[in-house]
Image: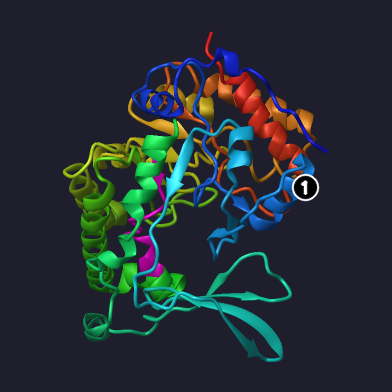
Amino acid sequence: MKNSGVSMSEQETMSSRERLLRALNHEETDRIPIDFGGNLTGIHQFAYEKLLAHLGMNDPSPTLMDVPQRLSRPCEELLRRFHVDTRYIATKYPEHFDGEVKKNTRAGRLWHDLTDEFGVVWSMPDDRPNYMDITHHPLDGATLKDLAAYPFPKGTDRSRFVGLREQAMAILNDTPYAVVSSIAGMVYETCWYMRGLERWFLDMADQPEFCEALIDRMLKYWLDWFDGFLAEVGDIIDVITLGDDLAGQTGPLFSPSFYREVVKPRHKKLIQHIRAKTNAKIWYHTCGACTVFLPDLIDNGVEALNPVQISASGMIPFELKPKFGEKLTFWGGAIDSQHVLPTATPEIVREHVRRNVEIWKPGGGYVFSGVHNIQADVPPENVVAMFDAAYEFGFYS
């Protein structure tokens, strides 16, 4: 089945790049910008394949843009079908790092294993290939002495940025789209990947000095990384995406006081470092009920919040928009991706998006995307209904 989509292009009066940048500056545009295809605004491989079949499309060169999450890189035909205003650029592993997925058999079961630059092992069983989970935390049980000797990857390795400027220039010169970075700057979250979540939570209470030492090592890596990244594209990039999950379904994942005393100063230092080298807008991702952290993120220099998980406690559009909408752009927040998008009818999805878009869009400061990645079980009809509703109801009078 091929859906012809919503035809309103004659009402558009701006380029995608102009539309996004003006929305980020809290100006009303011709319509709300639409985002799709990032590491946290993307689509699972299985859902992508079903969506292409539903629309009668063919991806000539299907690739995964994020291996652990099994996210497909959407083809250009699909991005245009959904009127997407963003295009993403991505770095790669450094020259001498083997980032290939390995097949290993354990207890009679075939596994796909990926070891990242930090030594974290991500694994997926061959018989349940939905996504990868962490199966090895390299700093589990490590002491401060062990941490000091641990071989961190080098953020100064510029081989990871080879070809990046060409990617960005092609978007800037040959298309009307905004240039957005893939996710980076995980100062806090990668720490617990390396340590293990349970051990990390105990560290926060028992040995906060270990937490601070590890976060400082991580911050150093990202400061060096962004030196190289911004040397290549700091004059081109429109939006830089950072992220560390700070909250869960009902509230913070850890004490806000720990955030303010330990994590926030490092977040702020990284953002100030980036801000000194580019005019790009700073986009920050945290899932969950994160309202307690929003004043801190604004103080850090964050300009856009993603994914705005409206199914989490307190994440209510008609409360968030008037309270924080003058200082934060909300990037997402138009669909309950837990209870509506996977299970509702297309008609309910359409109405759900319409109601939320009408709350978010006044005064600018809003970019549409799904609330986090579209998962494997989401019906293609609902994906189409979601994006078509965003386009139809996103126009300003």
The percent position of residue 33, horizontal first and vertical second, equals 49, 28
Which picture quadrant has residue 71?
Answer: bottom right
Q: Which residue lies at the image location 28% right of the left edge and 69% below the top edge?
A: 211
Question: Quick one: quadrant of the N terminus?
Answer: top right
Lateral position of residue 3 relative to residue 226, left or right: right
Question: Residue 197's quadrant in the figure?
Answer: bottom left
Q: Residue at x 46, y 28 (%)?
A: 16
Amino acid of disc 1:
Ala
Tell which of 52 and 110 is nearer to you: 52
Count of numbered circles on the image = 1
- Residue furthest to the front in view is 174
Q: Secondary structure at mark 1?
A: helix
Q: Farthest residue in the left direction?
A: 276
Q: How is the image coloured?
A: rainbow
Residue nearest the viewer, comparing 271 with 162: 162
Residue corresponding to mark 1: 53
Viewer-proximal residue among 265 and 150: 150
The stretch of residues the image draws in magenta is 179-192
